[in-house]
Amino acid sequence: MLVPVDRTPDVDDLLPDLDLGTVMRQRPLGLGSLRQVARLTIAVTVSWAVAVAVSKSQMALFAPVTTLMVVQSSAWTTLGLSIQRIVGTGIGVLVASIWVNVAGLNWWSFLIGVGASLLIARLLPWSLGGQLQIPVAVVFVLAMGAGSLAQDAWRVADVFIGGAIGLLAVFIYPPKPRPEPLESALRSYRDAVVDTLREVGAESGSHPGPLADGTPHDYVAPSRRLRALADAGRDELVRYVEGAHLNLRARGVEDYIVGQAVRLRRLSGIGVQVRGVVGEANRLYDRAGPEPALATDRMRGVVLGLTELMAAVLGAEGDPVGRGDPARTERLAQDLEGDLRAAADALVDHHGGVGTVLGSVTLLGRLDLIRVQLVEFSDWEG
């Protein structure tokens, strides 16, 4: 089934392009579940049996090997690998068969054949696995030696037989896309964002003396993981969309896909601001020189209120992302806004002048922006 995803400008770049160029760059995803192993075992066996029954090549080899290489856990990935395998192997088998019949089999014909196949494969805008189909097919044919033109034609036909059976194995009853990996990735990202901000409040200003120059707070290291976790969430979103595309069992997932994409987009925006908070707090607190204009106790109070608001909006640790408490969200957001305004007023009255409060203003501004993002997230979920 073609999934007509509503590509709003907010999430367009998060969703994959489901076009011919993309399908030709598909890569194998691994064997996956035991059900996928069983599906692959049956498909390869059927492919071999059909090739034995109808093929007139010396060995019914290329059909089951092709099926083995193309069957994946999603119809979209299987289609991509099938095209790569059928086209690449077909070209390789055909050209190598002609070459070995013309030049014979010796060290220099083997060398030229393999070298030429690698040069041709290098020019194709496919995935590495797709590019290697041509030289692998050439090596198979050259190692098997010359045959008649009829046998060579059946070698190519076996590739199409194996690819067709591989496609049927997935398209007739495709695996239903599983949302659990995507939801788990979003939960992990959400939990890391909240934990990182919580650590900022707990550690900043807690050291007995100034940190040595160049020594970061402990919360700097986990903050650097946030980008990788965001990328992991996007990878799982792409995998889910591709698993639903052309999938007859993936009906009615359009709204779910858009919803998860928007959650990832908004969560990524919050994550970016948390990383900015980490940078400002790491620069301001536990350093030699004057104390920050934003007192440690006041900063911790704001951060604590913000983490409570995060739990209300984004869900507590272990809960699905975005399943928050609207009533609690409204109350916490109002309280936090009051705390932020009070902290900002205190900075205005700071006796050191404007220049001494710039870092604290920046930190407060980022914390307030996270509050605004959370309120907007809650409004969207509602």
Image (cartoon, rainbow, N blue to C red):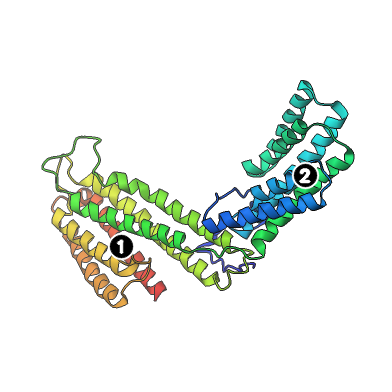
Question: Of the residues tagged 2 and 1, which is closer to the observer?
Answer: 2
Q: Residues within 10 Å of mark 2 (few under 14, many from 20)?
A: many
Mark seen at residue 164: none
Q: Residue at x 83, y 32 (%)?
A: 146
Label 2 vs 1, first from the N-terminus: 2
Q: Which residue lies at the image location 73% right of the left edge and 56% below the top edge? A: 164
Image position, residue 298 (x, y; %): 16, 58
Which x, y percent locates residue 7? 56, 66
- In the image, residue 247 above or below residue 54: below
Where does residue 83 sit, x and y in percent of width and height?
71, 51
Find the residue positioned furthest to the left: 208
**Which quadrant of the rendered structure holds the C terminus?**
bottom left
Q: Secondary structure at mark 2?
A: helix
**Of the pair 176 and 320, the residue shown nearer to us:** 176
Residue marked by disc 2: 90
In the visual, does 327 lie left or right of 113? left
Up the image or down, 100 lies above or below 56; here it is: above
x 79%, y 22%: residue: 106
Q: Give neighbour class at mark 1: few <14, some 14-19, many 20+ (Cα, 10 Å).
A: some
| Image-based side of 348 in relation to 261, left or right | left
Query: Where is residue 95 shown, x and y percent of the image?
Result: 81, 37
Q: Is residue 316 left or right of residue 33?
A: left
- Residue that extends furthest to the top in the rendered view of this protein: 107
**Would you identify the image quadrant in which residue 374 lies?**
bottom left
- Residue hosting label 1: 317
**Residue 187, picture quadrant:** bottom left
Q: Quadrant of residue 363?
A: bottom left
Q: Secondary structure at mark 1?
A: loop
The tally of labels here is 2
Amino acid identity at mark 2: Gly
Q: Nearer the viewer, residue 76 or 174?
A: 174
